[in-house]
Amino acid sequence: MKKHLFICFIGLILVACSTKDKLTPTQTNKFELLPQAIKAVVKTKNTQVMKQSYLLLNYKEQEILWNTKWDMILEKDKQTLSIEQKNIILNIANFVNTKTIKNLFKNPQDGTNFLKDNLNYFKQHFTEEQLYLLIECPYFESDFSIFKSNNYINEFSNARGPIAGVNNCSCYYSLSCGFIGLGSSCLDGKCQKVQGCGIVGTSNCTGTCSK
């Protein structure tokens, strides 16, 4: 009996040792766990192609994308993020997950209202470039940090988008309305309706960019 218990004990030790060095889901880089279809979208450095590809994902894939990105920011940048910044990220994630991306596409005004009510506060704690990547642009990678936002945007081939003040723009509130005129909003006017902008790509624009 004692011999049997001793063998079992040794077996448990061996199992524990063999799994000790294996990464758990929380230790594994969440980006590496993403399906290839999502990786292909978020790694694209052409914003127009990225938006078009993003809209081809189903709602579940879009939710996985954004929740993975927000989780990675909270984990990777946890030593640098302020309490206010962490709460803002959680606020955005909670809003999107409560409303669901599917319903935000059906009722974009909900996302528009959320941005209207909160962006001024968000801008007290994040730069426009950081907000663009936190709210609107799905781009991220395995070594993503919200504090490298300027670097990422500089790499995008068409990130600057339309110049504020001309009769076209991308969104209702446009974090991508034109990086020359950051903080622009879309007013009723002549530009065509464009999807894939605003809160997690669920808003659109039918106006002109204005500072």
Image (cartoon, grey):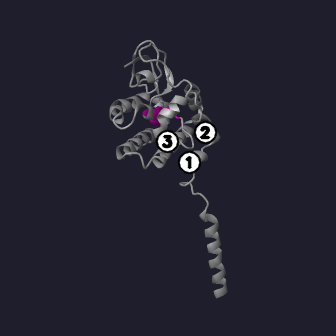
Quadrant into which the C terminus falls: top left
The disc labelled 1 sits on which kind of residue? Answer: Lys
Q: CA distance from mark 2 to mark 3?
A: 16 Å
Q: CA distance from mark 1 to mark 3?
A: 13 Å
Question: Who is closer to the viewer here, 97 or 33?
Answer: 33
**Is the residue marked by circle 1 packed among few (<14), some (14-19), or many (20+) residues within 10 Å?**
some
**Is the residue marked by circle 2 packed among few (<14), some (14-19), or many (20+) residues within 10 Å?**
some
Residue at which label 3 appears: 145
| Residue 138 point in image, percent of width and height | 52, 35
Task: Classify residue 85 as left or right of residue 133.
Answer: left
Residue at which label 2 appears: 39
The disc labelled 3 sits on which kind of residue? Answer: Ser
Indicate which disc, 1 or 3, sits on the residue closer to the N terminus.
1
Residue at which label 1 appears: 30
**Is the residue marked by circle 3 packed among few (<14), some (14-19), or many (20+) residues within 10 Å?**
some
Q: Which residues are magenta?
A: 131-138
At horizontal 64% and vertical 40% (from top left) the residue drawn is 36
| Residue 202 point in image, percent of width and height | 48, 30
Q: Is residue 129 above or below residue 83?
A: above
At horizontal 45% and vertical 24% (from top left) the residue drawn is 179
Task: Classify residue 11 as left or right of residue 168.
Answer: right
